[in-house]
Image (cartoon, rainbow, N blue to C red):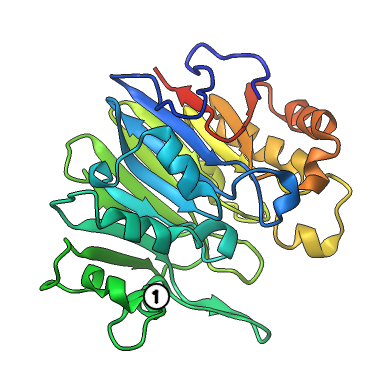
Amino acid sequence: MLLGLYPVLGSATVPGQSCPAESGISVQVLGSGGPIADDARASSGYLVWRNGKARLLVDLGGGAILRFAQSGASFADLDAILLSHLHADHSAGLPALLKSGYFAHRTRSLPVVGPAAGGNTKVHFPSLDEYMKSLLQTGSGAYQYLGDYLSEEGGMPPLKLTTVANKLGDKTSVVTEGGQAGLSVQAMVVSHGPVPTLAYRIEVDDKVVVFAGDQDGRTDAFVDFARDANLLVLHMPIHEAAGAAARALHAPPSKLGEVADAAEAKSVLLSHFMARSLADLPGNVALVKSRFAGVVEVAEDLDCFSLD
């Protein structure tokens, strides 16, 4: 759904089409939904396209692998997979993608970036390394038949795992060039309740895309991290009147607008909706716009936005 096009943003694709630009930078939404199927959308997932090829995959929740196929992206072209956190609606599609990748004729290793371990007294979240081993480790993994991905001597180019273990608000470079000049990725640890979570700043050619991930809006350093983004992707699963439990995990619409304004983003893409935020989508978008004077777009699955 497009709410007033900005000159640098293109229109949506339809299923079966890839992002249209044969040159330049585009962002495609694989999944614009949340963890509950009643939103009738795939869960979180995004592609960053460069010169007609999908180079970065950010999250891959339930249903997003179908959108990956519909987008026309190739597993062989990916320079990295960036996982914001290990909630199922952001990561459950990864094993299926890796299985599909067996048939993609990939010839180089694949960086995968994700958070460190954490949690609270009620729930523990594994580190990226622990998570991947629980899936793929030969002898113990749930999908150990895909264990070649963790072996330098397997039949597949291996995954290169990077676990980001910084303190809240710290940032670090996690991808430098990704096999191609002019591409770099930084990760920042952001607050999403007890869930270890990363935001990503992607600088490619002369464009900046920032994926905020799920966060509660309490990471002050994120504003500078997102500074001057051509496109700032913000998640809006809750409405303004959400209770304390929801706000402990997610920022309400007004806070999203305040963050975008403070970061001086050029444009914002709202995504990761749940039925509770879709119930009055125009009203929630209006709250964002009341704090942010720039262009605000509303994601649908397979929407594609050109930054050129």
Residue indicated by mark 1: 135
- Can you see residue 172? no
Q: Where is residue 133 in the image (x, y as percent from the top left)?
A: 35, 78
* Residue 164 against residue 79 in the figure, above or below: below
Report whether 78 appears left or right of 141.
left
- The residue depicted at 17 percent of the width and 36 percent of the height is 181
Find the residue positioned furthest to the top. Answer: 7
Q: Which of 146 and 219 is in front in this view?
A: 146
* Residue 305 against residue 88 in the figure, above or below: above
Q: Where is residue 236 in the image (x, y as percent from the top left)?
A: 70, 44
- The residue depicted at 14 percent of the width and 71 percent of the height is 154
Circle 1 SS class: helix
* Residue 22 against residue 193 in the figure, above or below: above
- The residue depicted at 57 percent of the width and 65 percent of the height is 87
Report whether 244 appears left or right of 55.
right
Q: In which quarter of the image is the N terminus?
A: top right
- Can you see residue 247? yes
Q: Position of residue 166 (x, y in %)?
A: 42, 67
Indicate the amino acid at tag 1. Answer: Leu
Find the residue positioned furthest to the left. Answer: 153
Q: In which quarter of the image is the C terminus?
A: top left
Q: Where is residue 199 in the image (x, y as percent from the top left)?
A: 49, 52
Q: Which of 299 and 200 is in front in this view?
A: 299
